[in-house]
Amino acid sequence: SGWGGDHPKTASEVAMEFTAEEKQEIRRMKGEPKLYDKLAESIAPNTFGHIEVKRGILLMLLSGVHKTTSEGIRLRGDINVCIVGDPSTAKSQFLKFVHDFLPERCVYTSGKAASAAGLTAAVVRDQDTGEYCVEAGALMLADNGVCCIDEFDKMEQHDQVAIHEAMEQQTITITKAGIQATLNARASILAAANPIHGRYDRSKTLRANVQLSAPILSRFDLFFVVLDECDDVADYNVAKHIIDVHRCDEELVEPPYSKDQMLRYIRFARTLNPQITEESRRVLIDCYRRLRQGDTMGRSRTAYRITVRQLESLIRLSEALARLHCDDDVKPSYVREAFRLLQKSIINVETEDVTFEDEFGETDGDIGGDFTGNNGLDGTAPTAANVSPDREEMRSRPEEEDQQTKPKKTKKKKKLQITFEKYEAISNAIATYLRSIEDQGTEEGTLKSLKWGEVIQWYLEQMESEIGDSLEELERMRKMTNLVIKRLVHHDRVLVVVGDSDLPELEQQLMVHPNYALTEAT
């Protein structure tokens, strides 16, 4: 069949098995506009949204090209996908869909109930002859197909180690009871995992959210983080879709292509072996270089280290996209789409730019407005941009307002946006410095903390070479640091206010939250 095997059939051999109508249908599908999106929408049609996850599963079903080097080393073509996310985000529905889509070539198992022997292979004694024999596990049974593992994070550590070889080399080696054998396990792995504490914590990295080892993380080609976020429009659409499904109204959830059409098209597409062109080779190298460059900037804290495996993932995804379009060559546009998918899976949750805009109840203040020259560091009244939320109502009392710092209601609100890397760098520097002050106090037997304003002043001194002699840059950096600290206190809960919280903001004493771990902070 077109799904592989030791001697996979060619495109012409598979085409011979189709009727004239089916061949015509494949030609028509191949020439349709937005084929990629339509095929993706036909994956798990009863599940609303999650279009990126559906694209990843579609490419996994198509897979890359299996290759054998001149030395006889086999290069993996199968694509491994992991879906991580909150409960009730339809992770298991995707696994069930793939299992129903390929009933003969897919094995479904649950991580909690699976052991190392159950996943790979077991050596058992035959009851009749008394001799030892090998019993196939889930990965062997899914050879040339897909192995769906639900509750992947619930697997024991030593059981996870057992599938390292199967995920990369696609073989299972057994040396037990006098039996030494190397068995094939050429299967794609589609795994679903829940975060450690039930819900995904956006303030932590992917590695801190999922109980998976670094070698396992690097063996997955695509990671998808699905979050259960409150959004009026999305909630309405999801509810409407689920009710339509429960009403068994098939017209409302009719996919662009039926299951049989999808099976025939994917079966034919898998027989193609697209070649990487010279232009695509240059684009691949450039995309890999950009991924590695982002890795050195700290972007990979959301996922894992970028290694050569991710370059191979780019190649496999690009080949799968070429197969999807029945193309004999891997075009640069396919490489760029593969790069976008891989980038989205590596840098999904945390690396969006951080925007500061009236986050804590300012209704008529101007975050981007002018600050007084000393920014309140000498104990004067705080400005509109750094009034704490619990003192918001005091601002409306005329007898307590300072005319110089009174916000102008006619001014248009501004947004201040910084990159996630910059925000991470400032927050890590501040948290590390405050923790070092606290450690000094612990050694001396006292509780040490710093004033809000002193923390800002300390960071500005560290950035003196970058600021230079520009007063404008000094004010911009002062404003940005103040807003970062405010977010760390009120939003991320990395810093806590100790002592009197009714003091002016810049006079409040700050400490690092005792439960905050400075992992990879320096």
Image: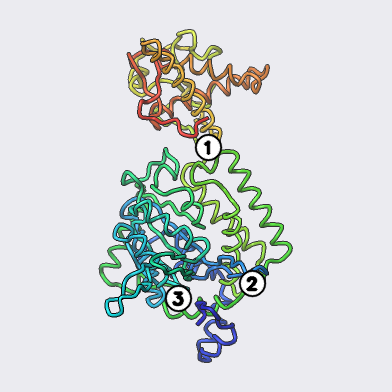
Which dot marks residue 257? 3
Residue closest to the far right: 278
Quadrant location of residue 387? top left
Q: How many marks?
A: 3
* Residue designated by label 2: 274
Looking at the picture, which amino acid does disc 2 mark?
A: Pro
In front: label 3 or label 2: 2
- Above or below, 478 relative to 330: above
Query: Residue at 41% across / 68% down in the picture?
Result: 178
* Residue designated by label 1: 420
In front: label 1 or label 3: 1
- Above or below, 41 relative to 446: below
Query: Residue at 42% across / 69% down in the picture?
Result: 179
Q: Describe residue 58's horizontal placement relative to residue 395 as left or right.
A: right
Q: Earlier in the sequence, mark 3 or mark 2?
A: 3
Q: Position of residue 194 (x, y in %)?
A: 35, 51
Quadrant location of residue 450? top left
Taking depth in this image into account, of 365 and 203 the one nearest to the observer is: 203
Q: Position of residue 460 (x, y in %)?
A: 57, 18
Looking at the picture, which amino acid does disc 3 mark?
A: Tyr
Q: Earlier in the sequence, mark 1 or mark 3?
A: 3
